[in-house]
């Protein structure tokens, strides 16, 4: 992966996730961070710090990004909710003991993704 | 899927931390306020988007959205006030530049701010129905900067000044103008219109009002139109470069109104350069320009068309009422054709073939061609001239062209039946003297007439051609049947004409010389031998003869003369000198014809085979004629006076017209009866209208004549006046229709035949007794008419 195509997401504990820009921009918020004019720090350095999101959640979110890209390419007209549920179950199933690692309910994660990170496929649950 | 369905889930908000700090809102706001300042001061690099976004997000989440929003409004407003002052301070030419630059910066700042405050924009604002951030930014810019007291009027003034400068030829910064007008449009269409466009249109109207006044005093029509066109194009180009596209139609309306509509009458009527002059001088480019420009304004083309029409009508009227012009028919018609060509060219090349102009041209021609009663005759004479000599050596296509043009003039004639009469006469002369240039051309014209007017129009004309052909065959048969010794005597060539097809000629007296009589009798016997039951009468006023003559010094000539002339000349075989009276007695030719004949034999230089005493130009009863021994001519064959068709003298003209009027009467009567058969009951005015409609392809019937015909039909009991109505003349078919003496009354037969056509004897559906009784009964007036109709209908059903 070329440097220009990637972005680094840093969790509250300091764990770094380097992912494709295209994947990261599934989140409208991250997209704005990187493309807003005026020279914000994130766009300058290609690094986004999330002091309030822990590594476990951030990891799930990154996985969701990739899953979303993969599946949205093939199925343009998919029903939003079923897409969400499939996405959600992907997130849930990929790590069996995932729930216990979370601080709070799984829906909190969803709200983070939806409201905070503006991930549009999940928007329906806002 | 809507959110409503999911209300069952309890979604806890993703909150970053529980808020305990009472000054939380204030602290968070301060961070954001600072960021906004930095953004406006171009100091934003290095700020963390995530941090700002998170703070705004938290404020909204913790129900401090109101504070955030109002803080935003306040901060933005104060920054915009600063900007406003800096723009105001800009000097002269830099004003627009500064405004434009600040506007670009503001847009960039707004985008950054909106991105940071995105969560508020998407959740808090819709639910509280506040103005979204972007729109808020535009509104504040509009209110604080553009509509600030100092800036608003100055901006408007500078924009309009730039336009004015450009109009007077200066070059201005169009890119800058574009950015500014685009800014106004972004702020809202009403801003663009109220702050700029409205005033732009007003100022432009004033400008063009003045300029058009100036131009019209100093320029002629063509120049003025060029200038107007240039200005129009300029404005269109100007709009495309730096205004909203919707302004184009508005500004062009202004230019059109001020430069064209307000002056259109003056332009069209301008002396020496107006519409009429353009037409006369064939200024196609100017005319085309006038058409394009005037098309843009209401009633512009109507004005052009009206002026053109009245000009055409006037010049046409002058042409047809000018007695000089009327002396030469061929020239007259050629003039008409040239005129039509000229106007056609104008309409095709300058008026883009506009149909309304074509129609106006056609109606004008129709108007003035029918102003003189001579038109039908002259058109026939024109054709005659062409078919005798004018079309000699012309290609087939060109012949068709000329004939089509003639047909075009023919269509304009209202009195087509008069044309028919003359055409028949002229055609007869051409055929009998063998003087037609091309039989194909003749036939082609007949076909065209048939297509235009129907079979009846040309059936007789075609009969004439048939007769000519048949005569050829007859002559062959005749010569074959005769003995050889005939070759010594005079050679006879006969054309047998069927009476109905050829123009009626009065039978004149004429004593043919004995030698001729002999062979004529032989022919008569031959012909009647093969065609029993027919009657032949020699038309001595139409034939020709070739005579071999020997003069004093032995010079021989062959003379081509008319039959009358032959009769006169043959007399001089037995006498050297004869008086007028003697000649008259011997030949029994009618006086006027005889005089004309003698004149052509004795008084025409180069053709005087006779000498006259005294040597005057006119023939008197007391003159004496001698054979002219001293006659000389360069040519062996001398042609003496077969006169081509001439335009008629006044009395002849009157006579022809009268004959045509007589012919019209039965046509009118037939039309009346045809109409009444269909309608049964009809009032006078409607009858007149219907008759006119039916006959208009042949001629325009005179309503007075129609009335007379109706009365005549009533007298002869074809029609009946209705007894029930007092005010309307209601006429219906008589119920006891019986034609009087059909054998003797030719006319009645004709009408009777009309009625007999589909076995409804005089429309006798009215004949039943029941109807008669009903008709006589006294019914209240109002229902009389409808009652009559219903009875007629019922009678029809029962089969009368």
Image: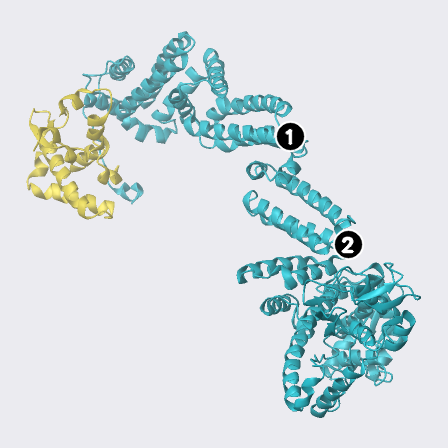
User: Residue B722: in sight, yes or no?
Assistant: no
Name above or below for residue A71 compared with residue A50: below
Q: Relative to A20, is B619 on the left or the right?
A: right
Give the SS element for disc 2: loop
Colour representing chain A: yellow
Looking at the image, is mark 1 or mark 2 nearer the viewer? Answer: 2
Q: Are marks 1 and 2 on the same chain?
A: yes
Query: What color is chain B drawn in?
Result: cyan
Residue A17, position as x, y percentages in the image:
8, 30
| B62 vs B582, nearest the viewer | B582
Nearer the observer, B541 or B684: B541
- Can you say whether B256 is above or below B317 in the image? above
Residue A121's image quarter?
top left
Task: In this rendered view, identify the residue nearer to me: B416 or B642.
Answer: B642
Give me the chain letter of mark 2: B
Q: Quadrant of the N terminus of chain B?
A: top left
Which chain letter matches label 1? B
Question: What residue sits 61% from the left and 46% below the top?
Answer: B342
The image quarter containing residue B422 is bottom right
Q: Which residue is mark 2?
A: B372
Looking at the rendered image, the quarter that the C terminus of chain B falls into is: bottom right
């Amino acid at each position: 992966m070329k440097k220009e195509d990637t972005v680094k997401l840093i969790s509250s504990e300091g764990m770094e996730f380097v992912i494709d820009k295209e994947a990261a921009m599934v989140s409208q918020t991250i997209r704005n961070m990187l493309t807003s004019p005026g020279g914000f720090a994130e766009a300058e350095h290609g690094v986004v710090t999330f002091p309030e999101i822990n590594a476990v959640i951030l990891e799930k979110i990154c996985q969701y990004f990739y899953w979303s890209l993969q599946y949205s390419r093939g199925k343009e007209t998919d029903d939003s909710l079923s897409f969400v549920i499939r996405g959600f179950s992907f997130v849930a199933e990929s790590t069996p003991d995932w729930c216990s690692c979370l601080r709070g309910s799984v829906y909190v994660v969803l709200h983070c993704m939806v409201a905070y990170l503006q991930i549009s496929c999940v928007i329906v649950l806002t | 899927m809507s959110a409503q369905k999911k209300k069952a889930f309890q979604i806890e908000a993703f909150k970053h931390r529980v808020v305990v700090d009472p000054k939380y809102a204030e602290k968070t706001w301060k961070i954001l306020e600072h960021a906004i300042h930095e953004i406006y001061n171009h100091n934003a690099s290095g700020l963390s988007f995530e941090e700002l976004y998170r703070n705004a997000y938290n404020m909204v989440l913790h129900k401090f959205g109101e504070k955030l929003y109002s803080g935003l409004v306040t901060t933005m407003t104060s920054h915009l006030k600063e900007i406003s002052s800096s723009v105001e301070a800009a000097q002269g030419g830099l004003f627009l530049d500064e405004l434009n630059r600040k506007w670009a910066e503001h847009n960039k700042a707004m985008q950054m701010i909106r991105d940071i405050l995105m969560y508020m924009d998407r959740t808090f604002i819709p639910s509280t129905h506040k103005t979204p951030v972007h729109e808020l930014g535009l509104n504040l810019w509009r209110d604080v900067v553009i509509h600030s007291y100092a800036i608003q009027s100055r901006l408007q003034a500078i924009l309009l000044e730039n336009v004015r400068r450009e109009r007077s030829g200066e070059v201005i910064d169009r890119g800058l103008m574009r950015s500014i007008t685009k800014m106004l449009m972004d702020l809202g269409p009403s801003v663009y219109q109220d702050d700029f466009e409205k005033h732009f249109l007003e100022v432009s109207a004033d400008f063009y009002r003045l300029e058009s006044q100036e131009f019209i005093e100093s320029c002629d029509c063509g120049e003025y139109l060029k200038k107007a066109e240039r200005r129009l194009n300029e404005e269109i180009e100007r709009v495309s470069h730096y205004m909203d596209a919707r302004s184009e139609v508005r500004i062009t309306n202004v230019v059109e109104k001020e430069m064209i509509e307000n002056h259109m009458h003056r332009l069209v009527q301008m002396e020496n350069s107006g519409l009429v002059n353009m037409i006369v001088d064939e200024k196609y480019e100017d005319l085309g320009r006038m058409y394009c420009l005037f098309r843009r304004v209401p009633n512009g083309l109507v004005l052009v068309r009206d002026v053109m029409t009245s000009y055409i009508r006037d010049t046409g009227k002058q042409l047809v009422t000018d007695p000089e012009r009327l002396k030469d028919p061929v020239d007259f018609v050629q003039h008409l054709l040239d005129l039509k060509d000229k106007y056609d060219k104008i309409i095709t090349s300058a008026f883009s073939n506009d149909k309304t102009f074509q129609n106006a041209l056609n109606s004008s021609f129709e108007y003035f061609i029918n102003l003189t009663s001579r038109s039908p005759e002259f058109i026939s004479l024109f054709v005659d001239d062409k078919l005798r000599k004018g079309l000699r050596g012309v290609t087939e296509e060109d012949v068709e062209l000329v004939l089509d043009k003639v047909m075009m003039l023919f269509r304009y004639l209202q009195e087509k039946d008069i044309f028919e009469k003359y055409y028949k006469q002229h055609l007869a002369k051409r055929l009998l003297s063998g003087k037609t240039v091309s039989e194909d051309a003749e036939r082609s014209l007949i076909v065209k007439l048939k297509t235009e007017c129907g079979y009846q129009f040309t059936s007789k004309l075609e009969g004439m051609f048939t007769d000519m052909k048949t005569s050829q065959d007859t002559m062959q048969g005749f010569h074959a049947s005769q003995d050889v010794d005939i070759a010594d005597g005079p050679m006879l060539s006969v054309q047998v004409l069927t009476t109905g097809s050829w123009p009626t000629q009065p039978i004149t007296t004429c004593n043919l010389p004995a030698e001729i009589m002999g062979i004529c009798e032989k022919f008569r016997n031959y012909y009647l031998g093969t065609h029993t039951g027919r009657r032949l009468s020699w038309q001595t006023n139409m034939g020709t003869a070739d005579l071999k003559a020997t003069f004093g010094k032995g010079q021989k000539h062959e003379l081509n003369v008319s039959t009358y002339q032959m009769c006169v000349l043959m007399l001089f075989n037995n006498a050297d000198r004869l008086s007028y009276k003697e000649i008259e007695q011997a030949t029994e030719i009618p006086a006027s014809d005889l005089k004309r004949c003698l004149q052509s034999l004795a008084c025409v230089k180069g053709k005087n085979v006779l000498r006259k005493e005294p040597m005057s130009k006119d023939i008197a009863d007391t003159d004496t004629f001698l054979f002219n021994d001293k006659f000389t001519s360069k040519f062996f064959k001398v042609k003496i006076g077969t006169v081509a068709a001439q335009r008629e003298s006044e009395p002849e003209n009157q006579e022809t017209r009268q004959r045509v009027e007589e012919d019209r009467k039965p046509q009118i009567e037939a039309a009346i009866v045809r109409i009444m058969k269909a309608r049964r009951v009809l009032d006078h005015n409607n009858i007149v209208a219907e008759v006119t409609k039916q006959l208009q392809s042949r001629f325009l019937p005179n309503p007075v004549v129609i009335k007379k015909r109706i009365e005549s039909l009533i007298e002869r009991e074809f029609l009946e006046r209705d007894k029930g109505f007092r005010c309307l003349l209601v006429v219906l078919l008589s119920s006891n229709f019986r034609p009087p003496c059909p054998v003797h009354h030719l006319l009645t037969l004709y009408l009777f035949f009309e009625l007999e056509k589909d076995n409804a004897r005089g429309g006798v559906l009215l004949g039943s007794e029941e109807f008669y009784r009903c008709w006589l009964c006294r019914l209240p007036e109002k229902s009389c008419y409808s009652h009559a109709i219903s009875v007629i209908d019922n009678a029809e059903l029962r089969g009368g």
